[in-house]
Amino acid sequence: MGETNEDRVKMLTILANMEPVPESVPINKLIKIPGTPLANAVELDSFDFVRTIATARLLMPRAYIRLSAGREQMGDELQALCFLAGANSLFYGEKLLTAANPTPEHDLNLLKRLGMSGETIEENREEEC
């Protein structure tokens, strides 16, 4: 997948038309890595990233829209906008594959500042039963 607005819309449209619709939709903010094909890609505007989250929420209202890679570069304000736009999950912990994430303490503090609380996968599964 590329990183243009059209690429993102196409990806979300394909996901939204799957049967069944995915339960979990991770949304990454590109982390440019030297030597990779997207190392010199144009930086995605923060508002376009938030629009991507909002579009995912509108197209897949029951899915977990998860903030994943790139959160360390986002800052608290952008992550807060993403939650207000429809993200309702994040990948938690200090490491996400090869990309760093904010510390668990930082994530919990951000959720507290936003008046939100977290739940574990196990807690969510218990509620569904």
Image (cartoon, rainbow, N blue to C red):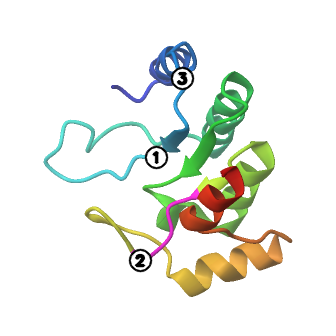
Q: Residue at x 80, y 50 (%)?
A: 84
Q: Residue at x 53, y 21 (%)?
A: 20
Of mark 2 and mark 3, the one earlier in the sequence is: 3
In the rendered image, which residue does mark 1 sit on? 28
Q: Quadrant of residue 121?
A: bottom right
Residue at the bottom extreme of this rendering: 105
Indicate the amino acid at tag 3: Leu
Q: Quadrant of residue 125?
A: bottom right
User: Where is 114 relative to 48, above or below?
Assistant: below
Residue at the right extreme of this rendering: 115
Q: Main secondary structure of the magenta part?
A: loop
In the rendered image, which residue does mark 3 sit on? 12
Q: Residue at x 56, y 49 (%)?
A: 66
Q: Which residues are magenta?
A: 90-94
> Quick one: SS at disc 1?
loop
Residue 115 coordinates in the image, percent (x, y):
86, 71
Indicate the amino acid at tag 2: Glu
User: Where is 127 relative to 29, above or below?
Assistant: below
Label tally? 3
In the rendered image, which residue does mark 2 sit on? 94
